[in-house]
Amino acid sequence: MREMSDAEWRAFIGHGTRTGKLATVRADGRPHVAPISFLVHGPEVLFFTGPDTVKGRALRHRPSFALCVDDERPPFAFVLLEGEARVEDEREQVRTWARRIATRYLGEAHADAIARHSEESGEVLVRGHITKVVARTGLTTSEDAAQLVNTP
């Protein structure tokens, strides 16, 4: 597999409606993984959750996270983001980012309703500062495939 450049991994995770698998650590030390809708904006990944969800509680207790976004079809590719999260409940920020995320995943026609719902239901905005990126794309040439097949 080949490492993706910064521009490549950002394009990959921002493509279409790919969701991410968010990994957090519960207060008792057990892992937790949940699918999320998200956006990457500069050095941050942004998403929403309820303040009393497993991920909401886990991120307040221990703000470390990992987020995996992948393409399960050959030639396969993935991006793994690691970072530190900050949970915010400022309503203007919740509304603004909820609208942007909803536009990506559900389209402009539903964005205002989703933003209102997020704000009214007390959801919080999670700003994850990205500290590490591992990004790989699948085999790109027949020589790469031949080498993989012939490796013991």
Image: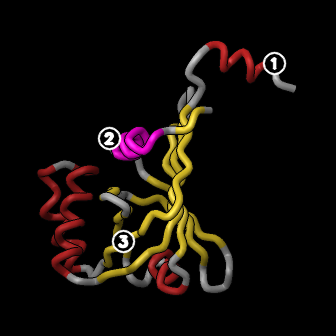
Q: Position of residue 101 (x, y in %)?
A: 26, 58
Residue 66 lies in the magenta stretch: no
Relative to 121, is 39 above or below?
above
Q: Quadrant of the C terminus?
A: top right
Q: Residue at x 53, y 44 (%)?
A: 135
Q: Residue at x 82, y 24 (%)?
A: 151
Mark 1 closeness class: few <14, some 14–19, many ≥20 residues within 10 Å: few
Secondary structure at numbered mark 3? strand
Residue 93, quarter of the rendered image: bottom left
Residue 30, quarter of the rendered image: bottom right
* Residue identified by numbered label 2: 16
Amino acid, disc 1: Asn
Specify start and end residues of the magenta stretch as a single range.
5-14
- Mark 3 and mark 1 lie on one chain; the one further toward the N terminus is 3
* Residue identified by numbered label 1: 150
Residue 13 lies in the magenta stretch: yes
Mark 2 closeness class: few <14, some 14–19, many ≥20 residues within 10 Å: few
Secondary structure at numbered mark 1? loop
53 horizontally vs 126: left or right: right
Q: Residue at x 54, y 74 (%)?
A: 64
Which is more toward the observer, 112 or 66?
Answer: 66
Front: mark 3 or 2: 3
Which is more toward the observer, 47 or 9?
Answer: 9
Quote the CA–CA distance across marks 3 and 2. Answer: 21 Å
* Residue identified by numbered label 3: 127
Relative to 148, is 88 above or below?
below
- Mark 3 and mark 2 lie on one chain; the one further toward the N terminus is 2
Q: Residue at x 54, y 63 (%)?
A: 66
- Mark 1 and mark 2 lie on one chain; the one further toward the N terminus is 2
Q: Position of residue 120 (x, y in %)?
A: 20, 80
